[in-house]
Image (cartoon, rainbow, N blue to C red):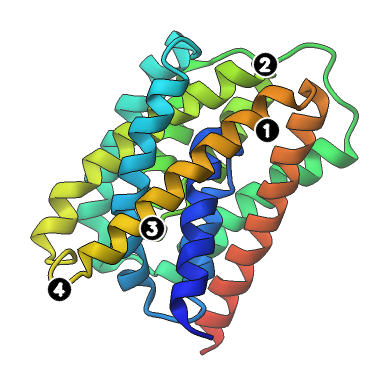
Amino acid sequence: MDPIYLLILAAFLVGSGKGGLSSAGSIAVPLVALVMNPVEAAAILLPVFLVTDWVSLGLYRRHFSRRNLAIMVPSAVAGIALATLILPYTSENLLLILTGAIGLWYVLKSWLMPRRSEASKAGVAPGIFWGLLTGVTSFITHSGAPPAQAYLLPQRLPKLVYAGTLAITFATVNLSKLPGYAIAGQFTGLNWAMIAGLAAIGIVGTGFGRWLTGVLPQEIYTRSIEGLLFTLSIILLFKGGTGLLG
């Protein structure tokens, strides 16, 4: 298959995720990695993430949880700094498996166990833990959604507040990746005309995601996010497992 078709689909998914369908964007890099080097795929899509980040910030600028941002954003940025130090010693496949297992654990727990009568609180210690893990996994495997969602979903935030909190968190996370990517030379030789086209598709996807988030009832929205998270987790487990087995 021509990689451009998967890149177009991936760009639309990135935009949809930024528009409110969390986890959709995290599927993008593993999807494109089926037909090209995952490092190259991540470098091509990072500008799309950055452009759609700014669009989503405009869409959700009035909808976010200030407390969650105060806990998660510094932790996630610290996670990125930590990831730059441990990257040479980290097995990407094991981290993919860990990230997928976290997402799968949360979704199955939500589906199979009785729901708590009360929403969980935005605790500092859990937020720091999940924020650090979000930064590490986002930098190394570009799949930071499962740890972030494992922390935010149990709080049962209103859907717009939930989407806006994630949008601001990952806008900061993706911007923080730029120095590391530039130093590693991952932007050298990219086809910027193609990337501009992919970014335009991503913007369309952002509008679609925001529209769908607005019209879906809260319960259906939550279940849709859990379904996307389940799908992403299976993909990550499969990709990590096949990578370990060679």
Where is residue 149 shown, x and y percent of the image? 59, 35
Q: Dot 3: within a 10 Å radius of its alpha carbon, few (fewer than 14), some, or many (20 or more) residues?
A: many
- In the image shown, does 136 or 204 lie closer to the viewer? 204
Q: Could you tell me the amino acid type at mark 1?
A: Leu
Where is residue 194 shown, x and y percent of the image? 30, 65
Q: Quadrant of residue 55?
A: top left
Residue 75 seen in the current view: yes
**In the rendered structure, which disc, 2 or 3, sits on the residue that comes first in sequence?**
2
Give the label on residue 94, or none.
none
Q: How many angstroms separate mark 1 from mark 2 (CA)?
A: 26 Å
**In the rendered structure, which disc, 2 or 4, sits on the residue that comes first in sequence?**
2
Q: How many angstroms separate mark 1 from mark 3 (CA)?
A: 21 Å
Give the label on residue 189, or none.
4
**In the rendered structure, which disc, 1 or 2, sits on the residue that comes first in sequence?**
2
Give the label on residue 120, or none.
2
Q: Could you tell me the amino acid type at mark 4?
A: Gly
Q: How many angstroms separate mark 4 from mark 1 (CA)?
A: 36 Å
Q: Nearer the viewer, mark 2 or mark 3?
A: 3
Where is residue 217 shown, x and y percent of the image? 80, 23
Residue lying at 48% horizontally and 22% vertically, measured from the top left:
165
Task: Report if the CB atoms under discs 2 and 3 are less than 8 Å apart.
Answer: no
Q: Which residue is mark 1?
A: 212
Q: Which residue is mark 3?
A: 198
